[in-house]
Image: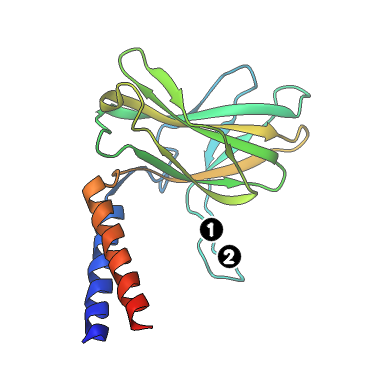
Amino acid sequence: MVKNFLVIAVTVIASLSISVAAHATVRFDFADSTQGWAAEDWGYGLPALAQVGWSKDPDTGSLESNSSSMTYTRADSQNWTKVYLKGDFASSQDLTSEAVYTMDLYIPDNIYFGKAKLGVRTGNSWDLFESDEISLEQGWNGLSWNMGGVSNIADARQLGVEISGWFPVSDDAKWNIDNVATNSVPEPASMFLLGAGLAGIFTIKKGRR
């Protein structure tokens, strides 16, 4: 009986976990084009955005990406630099209920000490708000930022990303962005139920010892 209860409890908790995490809206998938993303000149030179096709990894068979390549060429002889890429919404978006901003970011092996900040612009004045700095690894990085405390998040106009680090001077630095999405913020009640369920399972298992 206890075993059956555990099976039911695990199923319920798993379903609840999926329901909490499943609500996301992909805002830019870069499947067919750069979808209007552009670079903003902060005095460090502008990258060129070009559409490329990425193939499957021959060893693992996993799809690396099928999106746009953001190619950056240094404007001067300084290696330490930054670039800001941005994608405007076609119209103002209310992100109050989907305030968790996520993206997949690919960093090539010729960029070192990479850092990123996710950004959002809101309101008529397009005020820019950015996340704390996120350290990057070469290869694919999953970035996430809860924009819940941002002013005018109900009037979001643009999503973006600032990338900084050591960039090559004589060679292009090519990175990739994919799956730019906004995700629902888990409701406190749902998270409480999830935690209570897990605690209950732990208690039952402990009592059987």
Rendered location of residue 186, percent (x, y): 28, 47
Residue 208 versus residue 58 in the image, above or below:
below
Residue carrying label 2: 57
Query: Of marks 2 and 1, which one's residue comes earlier in the chain?
Result: 2
Q: Going 22% across and 68% down the picture, which residue do you hit? A: 12
Residue 91 versus residue 182 in the image, above or below:
above
**Which quadrant of the figure contains the N terminus?**
bottom left
- Rendered image: mark on residue 198: none
Type of residue at label 1? Glu
SS at mark 2? loop
Residue carrying label 1: 64
Q: Is residue 127 left or right of residue 117?
A: left
- Using a 10 Å C-alpha cutoff, classify the residue at mark 1 as few (fewer than 14 neighbours), some (14 to 19) or many (20 or more): some
Q: Is residue 202 left or right of residue 112?
A: left
- Using a 10 Å C-alpha cutoff, classify the residue at mark 2 as few (fewer than 14 neighbours), some (14 to 19) or many (20 or more): few
Rendered location of residue 160, percent (x, y): 45, 31
Quarter of the rendering containing residue 111: top right
Residue 156 versus residue 26 in the image, above or below:
above
In front of the other: 23 or 107? 23
Rendered location of residue 206, percent (x, y): 37, 76
Q: Is residue 187 visible?
A: no
Residue 182 versus residue 157 in the image, above or below:
below
**Which quadrant of the figure contains the C terminus?**
bottom left
Q: CA distance from mark 2 to mark 1?
A: 7 Å
Q: Are marks 2 and 1 in contact (CB under 8 Å)?
A: yes
Type of residue at label 2? Asp
Q: Is residue 139 left or right of residue 129?
A: right
SS at mark 1? loop
Q: Going 24% across and 61% down the picture, which residue do you hit? A: 16
In front of the other: 33 or 165? 165
Q: Going 78% across and 34% down the picture, which residue do you hit? A: 170
Rendered location of residue 192, percent (x, y): 26, 53
